[in-house]
Image (tube, rainbow, N blue to C red):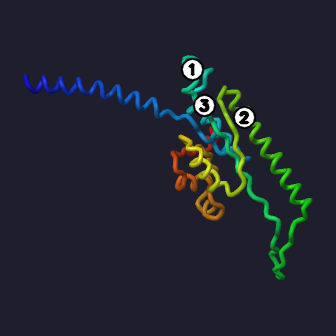
Amino acid sequence: METQSAGAAVGSEQQPLMKKNEKQNKKKMIKVIMVGIDESDESFNALRWTLDFLFVSIGEAPETRLDEVGKVVLVHVQQPFHHYVFPAGPGGAAFYATSAVVESVRKAQEENTTVLLSRALQMCKDKMAEAETLVLDGDPKDMICQAAEQMQVDLLVVGSRGLGKIKRAFLGSVSDYCAHHAKCPILIVKPPRESSK
């Protein structure tokens, strides 16, 4: 009899603890999701996956309060333009780009960024998801990790191009780098399997 009453006492103590843990879990909801966007289809696949599976919008759940709805931060990193070119042959002299060439490249980068982010923002708008954009200059691997840390995002989402081991070793992989260096949880979305084979 004593063991049953002790068990009942333990059971009654566990119930309030479970309710307390449920409240704590609700507070740890993902509020800010950062998605890396570039010109690849894989980055837009990652955004689509995020919007479909991780994001709660008011349209899908009318009972959701505004303070429970998360936000998507779309980050795009522009590679810096080097003003000089080293020839491959003998001589070793560097050629410097004229200011007109530099301005033309800068303008093309801005136009490309505008198109990419407009497409991404439209995807968010279609899902009635709150979104903001962030454009940075530098090495994408470093800048995405730094931005995720500075903004204290709850989750970083990047696409995977599915590079082989050799290409990944030579070219580097943004997703691989972020997986090892980001200070927040990271989700790497692989390309969808081709169903027609």
Count all numbered tags in the image, as a single digit: 3
Counting residues from the start of the chain, the first of labels 2 and 3 encountered is 3
Binning the other alpha carbons within 10 Å of mark 2 as few (below 14), some (14 to 19) or many (20 upward) gives many
Q: Residue at x 20, y 27 (%)?
A: 10
Horizontal arrangement in the rendering, residue 60 relative to residue 91 (left or right): left
Marking on residue 197: none
Q: Residue at x 35, y 25 (%)?
A: 19
Q: In which quadrant of the rendered image does the C terminus lie?
A: top right
The percent position of residue 69, horizontal first and vertical second, equals 57, 27
Residue type of the residue flagged with mark 2: Leu
The percent position of residue 28, horizontal first and vertical second, equals 46, 34
Gap in angstroms between the C-alphas marked 2 and 3: 15 Å
User: Which residue is label 1 attached to?
Assistant: 61
Binning the other alpha carbons within 10 Å of mark 3 as few (below 14), some (14 to 19) or many (20 upward) gives few
Gap in angstroms between the C-alphas marked 1 and 3: 13 Å
The answer to whether mark 1 and mark 3 are in CB contact below 8 A is no
- Secondary structure at badge 2 equals helix
Q: Nearer the viewer, mark 1 or mark 3?
A: 1
Marking on residue 121: 2
Residue at the top extreme?
63
- Secondary structure at badge 1 equals loop
- Secondary structure at badge 3 equals helix
Residue type of the residue flagged with mark 1: Ala
User: Which residue is label 3 attached to?
Assistant: 52
Q: Nearer the viewer, mark 2 or mark 3?
A: 2
Residue at the left extreme?
1
Give residue 2's quadrant in the image.
top left
Gap in angstroms between the C-alphas marked 1 and 2: 21 Å
Counting residues from the start of the chain, the first of labels 1 and 3 encountered is 3
